[in-house]
Amino acid sequence: MKRIFYFAGAISALLATENASAQNDSISMYEIQRVEVTATRAGEQTPIAYSDLTGDEIAERNYGQDVPYLLQMLPSVVATSEAGNGIGATSLRIRGTDATRINVTMNGVPMNDAETHSVYWYDTPDVVSSVGSIQLQRGAGTSTNGTGAFGGSLNMTTAALPTEFKGTASLSYGSFNTAKQAVGISSGLLGGHWALDARLSHISSDGYVDRAFSDMTSYMVQAGWYGGRTVVKALSFGGKARVGLSYTGLSKEQMAENRRYNPEGEIIGYLHDAAGNTLRDEEGVPMTGVVGFYNNHTDNYLQINNQLVVSHIFNDKWSLNATAHYTYGNGYYQNYKNDQKLAKYGLPAAAAGDITVTRSNLIRRKSMRNDFGGIVASANYRTKRIELSMGISANIYDGSHFGHVLAMEKVAEFDPTEYYRNYTTKYDANIFAKVNWEVASGLNLFADLQYRHIDHCISGVNDNFDDVTGALQRLDIARRYDFFNPKLGISYRRGAHNAYISASVAQKEPTRNNFTDIRAGEYPTSEKLLDGEAGYRYTGKVVEAGVNLYYMYYKDQLVLTGELSDTGELLSRNVPKSYRRGVELTLAVKPCKWFTFGANATLSQNRILDYTDYIDGVAFYRGTTTIAYSPAVVAGTMFDFHVAGFAAVLSTRYVSKQYLTNGEYEELTLDRYCVSDLNLSYTLHTKRIEAVRFGLALNNIFNTAYCNNGYGGLWLEGSTIEERGAWACYFPQAGFNVLANVTLNF
């Protein structure tokens, strides 16, 4: 460790003269890099609801958990985790909308998968360690690149290239054998023009749920050239992940027996006694049950994100940013399937001795490979009264899905066999212009106009099997969409007071599953959102407070109906009319230097009008119902004590009851929960190093037994809706758990 400090000191001494002479220019360098986020971010006078997180705030929360868990204390946010401890398969909901409706960008480049519209956070493990700032916009937000924002948008930027030599090393360890190792180093400004920055990290965890492990390695490297008014950066980030599958939840009975049980990878076979004899029931029939678990029941993925960013300031009014990007993805998930019909995999009956095998336990692998690239660019004009941004993007996605049966239990000699393959191409382009004009002192008019075009083609053979036709689903889908999305608003600021009102239109194309999981001849249509927002913010020296009213009206929103498609998959349909309306309240009080109190609450109604539910193919009119996974109350509080390097943050979040389906059945609900975390830290400064931070995250300190996600359905036991049965599965979350961290900055 001493050698590292001596090396850092030597480099710092060699660069001291250069950094001193470049100090004035370095201010401009940071200012130029801010151009990267100007076009798609909201400011104080933008009439929308948003929250910002700075790099320091992100670092304080970054012990190894995924991005959704770093954001779960923000207004209207609910985070979920299949593994139960916030690492691996995690997701995010905003105002009740799921991940497929939340637009995510990094440096303006879309991060959502072009087909599913989701972001799989373990595909870019520990990306948060490379993030310099985050803005979470709620509602339709401002125009951005990629899929439509139907509940919110998450705008992230990579950390700016530092102008001084620095480095960091971080170690975390805690419950469930969770560990994180990360190291980063930055060259500072070399020769007045060049800078290098790199990070390498590894995160591993056994997970709270059995075999829901994570093993993820990630990197980020960026090199930049600074030329007075121009910064050119080449950066690459990504990683490789191997995680244990855990996407099957537990019934309440299973949770009562073992909350950490994971049914994924179960091997079903004949049960034997201690002597090896087959157990039989009272009628002499051999008994079956779980005899073991498949040890490679995993999701494996490699994703590499590459960006070339050019930012230039022409003068005190005009600036330009352009980013060329390319993302490579390649991976698969492999699992063990019990008692599978061979025809479902396009396989003929097989001979096993004198027996003809038509069903068998087998191992399958579903793979995908994709390439995503394009360019995003924006020009910005700014005077004392006018802020104007014009942006354009053009992206192309090319992907393939294919699957193999790797082995069958009853067939000794079996060669791996491909049973489906299909291809997707998607072209996505948009152009937007937005202006914020101060027409009078403190009075701003806002306008944001976007045009978006999509071409989406899917062809080939899918993995969905149709029992009626006895064949795998054939795909031949070609759809084109043209969306015009205007946004208008007005804001007024006087001293510490700011009031605003806005109206926005957002439109969204269907996902891949909306096209593949259908009835013959039926295809989904696009969705439209009309979003009205009105709010007030007070920013004082001691108190900051805000209230935001929203009404989000959806036309043709796509929702799961409870029906099954022709291939047995859950079916989504467009519902003509639905809405979300509510109020978001925020408060921050800082009565003295060493204490801050924060709170937020969202009270909402989320409804589908004239909804018809389907149970076992029978239609039941339900009228006005609550949209699934939409809690009426989401709230949080935070007590932040900080003095002389010591900090203690006690945070509590509350989420009210959620329905698991749109039919509003009481037996299909996710119970309300309230969870508290305590984050303790102490930062030490020395002459040789900038800072050493010791942190301890005490999560769920009251050991609350809760679930933050689930799914379920009904079946008919008679001819009326009252004669029904229900089933539901839940994802239990970890009780009291600990993560310790030490971070060294030099």
Image (tube, helix red, strand yellow):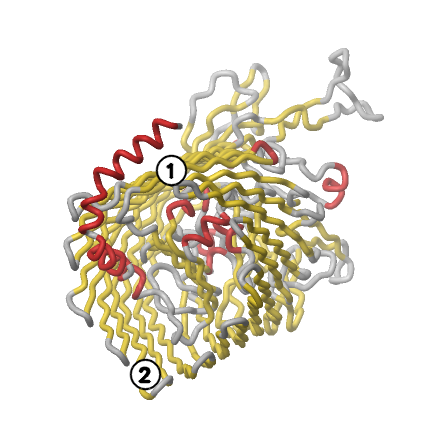
Q: Earlier in the sequence, mark 1 or mark 2?
A: 2
From the top left corner, tell me how far across and down residue 151 is, in percent. 48, 65
Q: Please identify the residue farthest to the right as the structure is shown.
A: 282
| Residue type of the residue flagged with mark 1 | Arg
From the top left corner, tell me how far across and down residue 651 is, in percent. 61, 55
**Residue 242 versus residue 721: which sits nearer the camera?**
242
Which quadrant, please, contains the C terminus?
Answer: top left
Quarter of the figure with residue 129: top left
From the top left corner, tell me how far across and down residue 326 is, in percent. 27, 47
- Report the residue marked by disc 2: 438
Please report the residue visible at 59 percent of the width from the left and 65 percent of the height from the top: 599
Task: Report, in whole angstroms, how far the alpha carbon at label 1 lies from the one at label 2.
Answer: 49 Å
Quarter of the figure with residue 207: top right
Q: Which mark is residue 519?
A: none
Q: Circle 2: is it few (<14), some (14-19), or many (20+) Cα within 10 Å?
A: some
| Residue type of the residue flagged with mark 2 | Glu
Frontmost of labels 1 and 2 is: 1
Q: Circle 1: is it few (<14), some (14-19), or many (20+) Cα within 10 Å?
A: few
Please report the residue visible at 53 percent of the width from the left and 19 percent of the height from the top: 411
From the top left corner, tell me how far across and down residue 390 is, in percent. 25, 69
**Cβ atoms under marks 1 and 2 closer than 8 Å:** no
Helix or strand or loop: what does disc 1 sit on?
loop
Q: Please identify the residue farthest to the top as the structure is shown.
A: 275
Q: Is residue 425 above or below residue 217?
A: below
Which quadrant, please, contains the N terminus?
Answer: top left
**Residue 86 versus residue 626: which sits nearer the camera?**
86
Q: Left of 97 or right of it: where is 427?
A: left
- Is any part of residue 550 visible from this angle? yes
- Is any part of residue 572 visible from this angle? no
Q: Which mark is residue 688?
A: 1
Please report the residue visible at 37 percent of the width from the left and 52 percent of the height from the top: 132
